[in-house]
Amino acid sequence: MSVLVVIVNWRTADLTVDCLRSLAPEIAAVPGTRVVVTDNASGDGSVERIRTSIDANGWNDWASVMPLEKNGGFAYGNNGAIRPALAAADAKPDYIYLLNPDTIAFPGAVRELVKFMDEHPKVGIAGGRAENRDGTVRRSAFRFHSPLGELENGLRLGIASKLLDRYVHAPPVSDVPCAVDWVSGASLMVRRTVFEQIGLLDEGYFMYYEETDFCFRAKHAGWEVWYVPASRIIHLVGQSSGVTGTKQVAKRRPRYWFDSRRRYFENNYGRLTKMLADVAWASGFAVFNVLRAVRRKPRTDPPWLWWDFVRYNVTSWASRQ
């Protein structure tokens, strides 16, 4: 059994080295595991720093660095290593494991996913449990987006969330393996045959929604997606993009987040459903903010989020496909 671990680096060399260090015990536990760090043209000396660390720690027999020509985003960075692995004449990996550079793998992080998928041949994709540094659990298994789910996500009102429970985007974390719609790309194991059947990650996404899209395509091709909590990582969230995470002051959401959301909805559900989802979220979030102001609660969302959402999405309504 062989596993190709792909880590996409963009100006996070120190975090990438820490991630590699945490993976070292898994190399012996899962024979045939190798790691490729692709670098999305960081331009900050990342390639040299990571290579030096690989040499200094004696990881050369299982880890390597692949510089890429540009910063093409998450899908582009992963495909840079996956494409040649699938095209190899021999020694193709049975599994490909996407792992963020801002993660620390616990013992068994790789082994438990491989074990589960070996035992369940219909499972094409599996993801593990993500935790914060303090041990609290992050939600990393989700339902697909829908207009009613977007309404709940924007509104965030207790009674509405109960009524829309079956559409909630991020359901409560399970302590046992369970089938889900999609799992976080921070820790995502894919059976090689899934790539061979449905293709690579869509490089039309710069960042965000690409793993959702990939899981959507896999499920529609007949594969199962599962959450396996025995596989555990610490996820430091948003260290490359600064868009998401546990920062006290949220950063303004970049244009590519809205572009990715639009691409996901239009490609998989069509423009009409996308417009319904837009109206649902914008309406719900407007009500939420009125209630927040009345209750004098602090704002925790990114600045200008509602205005940016409306501006980018109304523009997309008017554009031609």
Image (tube, grey):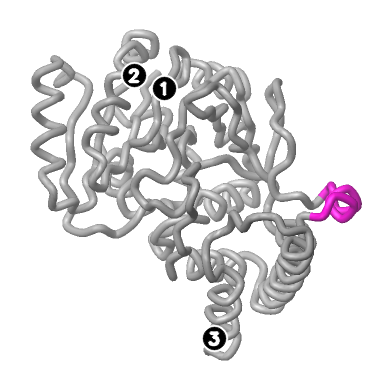
Q: Which residue is identified by label 1?
A: 105
Could one spot residue 216 in this view of the protein?
yes
In the picture of the structure, the residue carrying the numbered disc 2 is: 22
Type of amino acid at the residue the image marks with label 1 = Ala
**Residue, disc 3:** 315
Q: Residues within 10 Å of mark 1 (few under 14, many from 20)?
A: many
Marks 3 and 2 sit apart, C-alpha to C-alpha, by 45 Å
Q: Which quadrant of the figure has residue 286?
A: bottom right
What secondary structure is found at the residue carrying circle 2? helix
Asked if residue 146 can be seen in this view, the reply is no
> Mark 1 to mark 3: distance in Å?
41 Å
Q: Is residue 83 left or right of residue 294?
A: left
Q: Main secondary structure of the magenta part?
A: helix
Label of residue 262 in the image: none
- Give left or right: position of 318 versus 83: right
- Give amino acid for label 2: Ser
Question: Residue drawn at (90%, 52%), measured in percent from left and top?
Answer: 159
Picture coordinates of residue 1 (x, y %)? 40, 18
Residue numbers of the magenta segment: 157-166
State the image coordinates of residue 214 (x, y, percent, origin top left).
Answer: 52, 51
Of 174 and 266, nearer the camera is 174
